[in-house]
Image (cartoon, grey):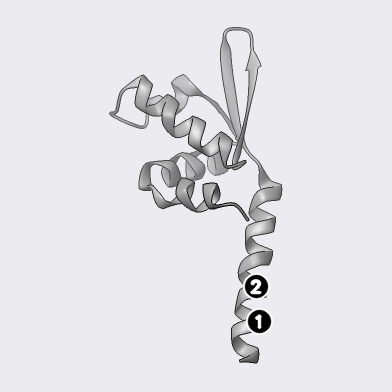
Amino acid sequence: MSDNVFKAIADANRRRILNLLKVHDTLSAGEIAEYFEFTKASLSEHLKILRNAGLIYGSKKGQYVYYRLNTSIFEDILAWVVNLRNKSEES
């Protein structure tokens, strides 16, 4: 698992974005922006970090980019946590 994942989820605003995408499945950047008070540039940076970590996908439809969760990465994270827990119980 890459350090980018941990960097991405360390920020509360990025965790809020992930939760929004969990609830709404797919949102445009403009729709995500409605939930926050920071600038479009800040939102763009948060989305970039989440994309680079592989936590979300962005797909362009017309003039908008729509974002959704990459659920397979969350399965990998869960497996990593379970494995970590099992190793600590063996110790």
Q: Which residue is drawn at the image coordinates 46% and 39% (left, top)?
A: 17
Q: Which residue is drawn at the image coordinates 57% and 34% (left, top)?
A: 51
Q: What element carries label 2?
A: helix
Label 2: how many Cα within 10 Å (few below 14, some 14–19, many 20+): few
Q: Which amino acid does label 2 sit on?
A: Val
Please provide percent x and percent y for residue 28.
Answer: 53, 22
User: Dividing the image into 4 quarters, which one contains the N terminus?
Assistant: bottom right
Cα–Cα gap, marks 1 and 2: 6 Å
Q: In this view, does 88 lie above or below 58?
A: below
Q: What residue type is labelled 1?
A: Asn
Q: In this view, does 38 lie above or below 83?
A: above
Please provide percent x and percent y for residue 20.
Answer: 49, 39
Q: Which residue is drawn at the image coordinates 59% and 23% (left, top)?
A: 66
Q: Label for residue 82?
A: 2
- In the image, farthest residue toward the top: 63
- In the image, farthest residue toward the left: 37
Please identify the quarter of the rendering in which residue 33 is found.
top left
Please identify the quarter of the rendering in which residue 23 is found.
top right
- In the image, farthest residue toward the bottom: 91
Label 1: how many Cα within 10 Å (few below 14, some 14–19, many 20+): few
User: Dividing the image into 4 quarters, which one contains the C terminus?
Assistant: bottom right
**Tag 1 near tag 2, CB within 8 Å:** yes
- Report if residue 24 is visible in the image: no
Circle count: 2
Please provide percent x and percent y for residue 4.
Answer: 53, 47
Q: Name the residue under label 1.
A: 86
- Report if residue 83 is visible in the image: yes
Q: Is mark 1 on a helix, strand or loop?
A: helix
